[in-house]
Amino acid sequence: MEKLARKQVQGLTPYLSARRIGGSGDVWLNANESPFDNEYKTSASRLNRYSECQPTALIEAYAAYAGVKPEQTLTSRGADEGIELLVRAFCEPNQDAILYCPPTYGMYAISAETIGVERKVVPLTSDWQLDLDSIAANLDNVKLVFVCSPNNPTGNLIKRADIVRLLDITKDKAIVVMDEAYIDFCPEASTVDLLDQYPNLAILRTLSKAFALAGLRCGFTLANEELINVLLKVIAPYPVPVPVSDIAIQALSEAGLARMRYQVLDLSANRAYLQAGLSMLPGIEIFDAWGNYLLVKFSDGDAVFKAAWDHGIILRNSPIPDCVRISIGNRIECEKTLSFIRNTLS
Ligand SMILES: *Cc1c(COP(=O)(O)O)cnc(C)c1O
C-alpha cells in the first residue's frame, strides 16, 4: 500500500511527539502539559446536528480574552491545525517555501513537507535570537516565516524589536507567523497589539498549555480579517466538535480565566523552585525560561535523560547537544525531579 501513497508522503517520518515516544513512569514532564486536571461538565445535547464551523460564542470569548475582534479570530483543532491551514492556504506546492529558525517547534517543517512545500532553515543566533540579515537574504519564494516566542524548546523570548523589523522586511512579501503557544505564561510579551499595523502578521494560540486542555484540541489563529477569510476557505466544514466548544467556552469564562491565571502563577513558582534548585548543582547551565518548561544543559545530557527515564521520570531530550527539556509539573513532581538529578550528579 505504501507505494500507492504520494512520493512526498512515502518519504515522511511522522512527528515524534512525546506521546509517541512512550516511556513508563509516574512523573511525566516531557510534553509541556499542565499538571492540573480541571473538571468540566458538558451537556452535549443536539449531537444529531452538525456544529457551527466557527462557533460564535467560542470565537467571541477568545477574541475578548486576546483583545481582538471576532473577525480577527479563527478556531481550529489545536494550534497545529492552524499551522497546516496557513501552509495549505498560502504556499503553492513545489514552488513556494516556508522559513523557520531552529532549534524550534517541529511541526512547521512537517506540515510543509507533507504538502510538498520547500523548507528554508535559518538557525537562531548563538543567543537564540533571529538572524535577520540571513532571513532577509533567504526570502525568495518564502510565503510564511515561523517565529516561536517563547520558543520551544529553548524557552526564551524573541526580541520585540526584531519581530517588528522582520514584519517590515517581509511586508507585501510574506506572512510572519508568531507561535504564541506559551504566551499565557507571559502575556505582556504578546505581539497581538501589532495586528493593527501589520496585515502580514498571524498569531497562533492554544488552550493546550496554560489552559490545561491539551486533550481538548482547541487552538486559535489571530490575524486581520482578510487573512482569516483566506484560512476559512481551506478549513474543514465542521472542525470544532460540539463538546469541544462547550468546554472551551467554560475555560474562557471569567471563572475559567481566573483559574488559568492562578495556575500560571503556581507553575511559575514551581519553575522558579526548579531553576533555583538546579542552579546549585555543579556543571549545569539553565536557560532563561518564559513558558512552562526549562531547558537545562548537563555535561552529559543523554545520560541524565536515560537515567531519569529508567527511574520513571520522563523528560524530553532535545536536538541541542546535552540539553534536556523539563516541563513544569506540580510541586511534588518538581521535587522528585530535582532530587533525582541531584543524586545522579553527585
Ligand atoms: C504545543 C505547541 C503547539 C501545538 O499546540 P496544540 O494546540 O496542542 O496543537 C504549537 N506550537 C508550539 C510551540 C507548541 O509547543
Image: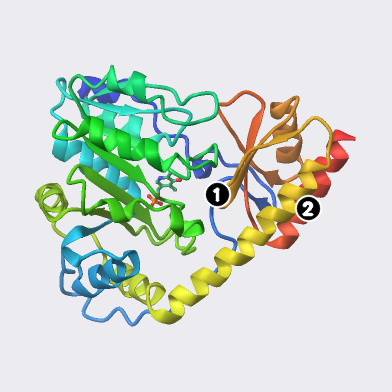
271 lies above or below 106: below
Q: Nearer the viewer, residue 334 or 69?
A: 69
Mark 1 closeness class: few <14, some 14–19, many ≥20 residues within 10 Å = many
Where does label 1 land, which residue?
290
Of labels 1 and 2, the one closer to you = 1
**What is the spatial separation of the Cα atoms under label 1 and label 2, in whole angstroms?**
22 Å
- The disc label shown at residue 79, or none: none
Q: Residue 195: x, y in percent? A: 24, 52
Q: Quadrant of the N terminus?
A: top left
Looking at the image, is mark 1 or mark 2 earlier in the sequence?
1
Q: Nearer the viewer, residue 111 or 181?
A: 181
Q: Secondary structure at mark 1?
A: loop
267 lies above or below 95: below
Which corner quadrant of the image does residue 90 belong to?
top left
Q: Is residue 77 visible?
A: no
Seen at 17% across and 46% down, the residue is 199
- The disc label shown at residue 336, or none: 2
Q: Residue 98: x, y in percent? A: 26, 28
36 lies above or below 127: below
Q: Residue 8: x, y in percent? A: 25, 22
Which corner quadrant of the image does residue 22 belong to?
top right
Seen at 45% across and 39% down, the residue is 158
Mark 2 closeness class: few <14, some 14–19, many ≥20 residues within 10 Å = few
Q: Nearer the viewer, residue 295 or 303?
A: 295
Q: Secondary structure at mark 2?
A: helix
Q: Is residue 67 visible?
A: yes
Which corner quadrant of the image does residue 330 belong to?
bottom right
**Colouring rule applied to residues:** rainbow
Q: Residue type at mark 2: give it.
A: Lys
